[in-house]
Amino acid sequence: MSLKHTPSDREQAFLDTVVEEKYQREIINGLAPFFNEKAPEDMMSFYSSDEVVQLRVLKGSERDVETRMPVKVTRHYFNLAQKSKPMQRLVKASPDETVNMQGSEDPGNQMDYSPVEGLLHKYEMGLMYVVSTCSAHCRFCYREELIARKEIQRQDGTVAKKGLAKIPEIVAYIKKHNAEVEAGGGRHPETGREKLREILLSGGDPMVLNNSKLAAWFGALAEAGIESIRIGTKEMAFYPKRFDKTFLDMLDKFHETYPHVGMHFMLHFEHPDEFLAKDDDGNYIKEDFGTFVWNPDAVEAMTQLVSRGWLTVENQTPIIKDINDDSDALRIMQREIKRIGAENHYFFCGRDIVAYKAFNVPIEKAWQIMNESQKGLSGVEKHAKLSITHYKGKTEVAAVTDKPIPGLPGAENGVVIFKLLRNPADAPEVGKVCIVGRNPDAMWFDDYEDRVLFDEAGLFEYSRVQTKKVDLEELAKEAS
Ligand code: SF4
């Protein structure tokens, strides 16, 4: 018996209104077009001949940059990157990437939280892999294992590529979990978790799916009792024309049909070069009154999205070496994002992905860059916090002190204070802190292992979460 999802009448009426559009992203896929000189003529200079030679030598070797992370860029992003080194660095493969391949195959042990393929159930929230690509690919991608279709070892010893979420399985899982929570008086009898009320559509980038597929997810999730849908996307930077009338009409129709369901766009701008207009000398263009001019596609898409008061638009970004480890750029980005009507959510320290040393900024430096970037910003412009995704959950890098703490051995060079913001397994842990002696070179938690001073958050005594895999046959029987 297999699971099937049959739309309700209300859901089907919404789906019947969806209109499709054909998009001209003009994507260049892989390095082959540059190796074989098949890329459009004006794009060929994106890689110098020296770069082509160096990358070609690595092809098929252990250091093949495309095996680590596929190469992809849109015409829109390429055009803007002509005037931006940070944007070039974001999408251009470099031989440096594979010098040190240290890192985790499954950053954050994500698969520990997966009861159904394609779903990570984290307390009240579910993160879904709905697609395994984006319109372009960031070299530092924290989902490189999904996008490069790598074989991942699960906790039970099995090895397989990460699979994508399927509507019937996800809907059946949500309904079953939430029915058990309700029967348990607000807590799941086995895991103690609360209602699964929020879903994050992720991947890959959900905005590469067509309107019908997105609408099918939205309708099915709303009918399953989900209260809030988040969409994690970098499409606003890679191809803002995707936020066109057909998509916005579909959103409006969804809201008209399911007004109780919240909708949140989590954008991913790394740098203001991705959305601000530049003059021929590469300087940002300013209006007479001092504000910056946005590029036409980005301003149109952002204005349309934020004008829908029933949804929220927030930006979050990791701080990555040679891309946005620049407090002046981050200050402009935070000001402009707030000015246009969106919010600044998280800055992240880079994750422990394979080859993270090529991309990550030391944790303490990231904290300094972020704090420097917020000098001169108003209270409403500086809502963003610096977070690092520990295996245990999102953790704020709350403070880095410069001075020794008198009487505290190990604190002679100052301390770093981490605060647990989210714990996917157990909400009561939230708010607990961990204090470590400083290590200016630290890029990941293991660089602090020998200098833990206080750890009520348990960041250094972590034991992996065990999530029971759901038996889909059983689920199908129960759902029928
Ligand atoms: S947009 Fe996100 S998921 Fe896509 S390549 Fe960039 S970091 Fe990875």
Image (tube, rainbow, N blue to C red):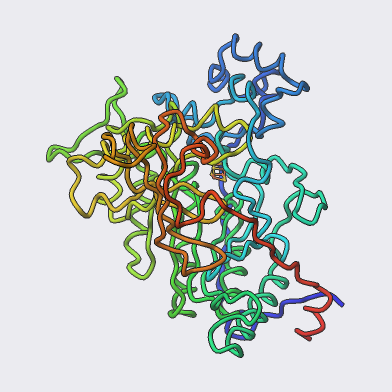
Q: Position of residue 15 (x, y in %)?
A: 59, 74
| Depicted 381 relative to depicted 365: above or below | below
**Which image quadrant: the N terminus?**
bottom right
Q: Residue at x 42, y 58 (%)?
A: 421
Q: Where is the C terminus found, in terms of image quarters?
A: bottom right
Q: In the image shown, does 321 or 217 lie closer to the viewer?
A: 321
| Relative depth, front residue between 300 and 108 | 108
Number of numbered discs visible in the structure rendering? 0
The answer to whether residue 84 is left or right of residue 128 is left
229 vs 99: above or below: below
Instruction: Name the residue rendered at 75%, 54% in the picture.
Output: 155
x, y percentage for residue 276?
32, 37
Return the x and y of residue 317 as percentages of the image width and height. Answer: 43, 44
Is residue 343 among what the camera can see? yes
285 displayed left or right of 141: left
Q: Is residue 16 visible?
A: no
